[in-house]
Image (cartoon, rainbow, N blue to C red):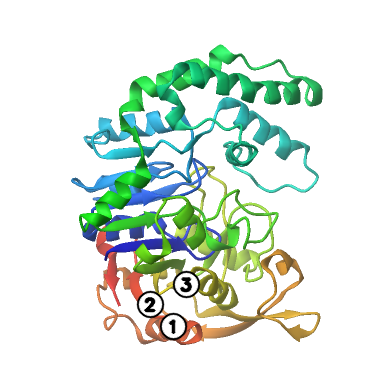
């Protein structure tokens, strides 16, 4: 591994953090490249559960450096709390975490706007109300405040005043709310400077220097391909690019430096919030998958919608991201189903159309096949050959349909439940 990108291939929650934790053993540096505290990455180590929102999950490996890249939108209070929790559990974070000086701050007014906009909208998106969208909007409007601004307090104050001039107009004229004080925002940011300022640096330079010294880099995204703001089920998407383009933009690395693009996929599919979901299971099967897989949001606690593996969705993900291989997670959750469905195609207006734009998925009727399930407890197995015949048939069918190798298989929540195919 020189530089590997791990990408969620569905609607997020594919087990990326677990796989990043597994892959970090062979990496020197782990980089989070987009999203913010709307992500909830769960890792189980020695029966202890860790939930990460901003810090790359590779931080659990001593001696590894973790980077919050320039493509991330960073909630300063959330990050400080996450650091303190980890350090309270004995993990050395501050000496191993780098924060890009080009990452943008999520500030209280972003979260307020996020909530107000969702409540006022006639078409609910299902936002986590963590301020992600408004922060990325400010970035594009060029009124955002970046972590690197903390080193010049006079310049920082000018940036805050300029941002609040716009935000307070919105609060007062549209929502009838009192203005946000400059002092409140300055206090929050300067507290971040005191507690975390020593970790802020030019992350792009750090990563390119690391490659010159033959360091191995692992890029970690949040959410999944089908939530990409350009390629996903717009408008029911996140506000960034969890795809390969976002990995390059959000880290500062270039395409020639990427050696492998690994797609992370669950053995079934889940989705949180609103939006089309062609392979969504019936109520009984959905609830069974939800309970077996503990499918509740790590950030919001919301129950996830559950459905069957979607071949056309994965084919699109392979095409857009240039995936070289797959990691299939939560295979054990399917144990006990007599029949397991797989969506092999889409029908639109009575005709087969697997290449329909994801924004139009609400028009799709899924085409399903059924495969025989298994009852054996597969969580005890550590090789592909040990798996039951029907489990192997299921994986081989997916591999043949997608024409891409399955490289890793996960049959349980902890590190030791993952193995190479």
Residue named by callout 2? 406
Element type where label 3 sits in the image: loop
Tag 1 near tag 2, CB within 8 Å: yes
For residue 174, above or below residue 251: above
For residue 183, above or below residue 113: above
Rendered-image quadrant of the C terminus: bottom left
Res. 345 image quadrant: bottom right
Residue 387: horizontal and vertical position, in percent?
31, 80
What label sits on residue 399 in the rendered view? Answer: 1
For residue 302, above or below residue 8: above
Q: CA distance from mark 1 to mark 3?
A: 16 Å
Res. 142 image quadrant: top right
What label sits on residue 322 in the rendered view? Answer: 3
Q: Is residue 174 left or right of residue 23?
A: right
Res. 311 image quadrant: bottom right
Element type where label 1 sits in the image: helix
């Amino acid at each position: 591994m020189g530089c590997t990108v791990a990408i969620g291939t569905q609607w997020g929650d594919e087990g990326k953090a677990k796989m990043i934790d597994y892959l970090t053993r062979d990496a020197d540096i782990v980089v989070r490249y987009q999203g913010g505290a709307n992500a909830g990455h769960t890792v189980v180590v020695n029966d202890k559960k860790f939930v990460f929102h901003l810090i790359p999950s590779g931080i659990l490996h001593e001696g590894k450096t973790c980077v919050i890249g320039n493509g991330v939108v960073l909630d300063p209070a959330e990050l400080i709390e996450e650091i303190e929790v980890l350090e309270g559990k004995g993990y050395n974070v501050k000496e191993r975490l780098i924060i890009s000086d080009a990452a943008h701050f999520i500030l209280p007014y972003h979260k307020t706007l996020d909530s107000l906009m969702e409540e006022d909208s006639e078409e609910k998106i299902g936002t986590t109300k963590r301020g992600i969208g408004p922060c990325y909007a400010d970035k594009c409007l060029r009124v955002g405040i970046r972590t690197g601004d903390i080193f010049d307090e006079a310049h920082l104050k000018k940036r805050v005043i300029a941002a609040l001039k716009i935000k307070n107009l919105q609060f007062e004229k549209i929502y009838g709310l009192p203005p946000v004080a400059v002092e409140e925002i300055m206090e929050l940011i300067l507290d971040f400077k005191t507690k975390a300022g020593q970790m802020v640096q030019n992350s792009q330079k750090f990563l390119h220097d690391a490659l010159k010294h033959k360091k191995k880099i692992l890029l970690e995204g949040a959410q999944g391909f089908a939530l990409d703001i350009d390629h996903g089920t717009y408008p029911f998407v996140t506000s960034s690019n969890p795809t390969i383009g976002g990995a390059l933009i959000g880290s500062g690395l270039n395409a020639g430096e990427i050696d492998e693009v690994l797609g992370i996929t669950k053995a079934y599919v889940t989705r949180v919030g609103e939006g089309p979901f062609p392979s969504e299971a019936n109520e009984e099967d959905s609830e069974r998958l939800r309970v077996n897989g503990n499918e509740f949001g790590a950030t919001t606690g919301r129950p996830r919608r559950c459905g069957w593996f979607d071949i056309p969705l994965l084919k699109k993900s392979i095409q857009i991201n240039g995936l070289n291989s797959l990691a299939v997670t939560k295979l054990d959750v399917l144990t006990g189903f007599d029949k397991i469905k797989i969506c092999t195609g889409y029908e639109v207006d009575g005709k087969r159309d697997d290449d329909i734009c994801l924004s139009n998925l609400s028009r799709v009727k899924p085409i399903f096949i059924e495969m025989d399930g298994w009852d054996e407890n597969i969580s005890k197995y550590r090789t592909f050959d040990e798996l039951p015949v029907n489990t192997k048939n299921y994986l081989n069918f997916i591999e043949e349909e997608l024409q891409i190798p399955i490289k890793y298989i996960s049959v349980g929540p902890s590190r030791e439940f993952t193995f190479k195919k």
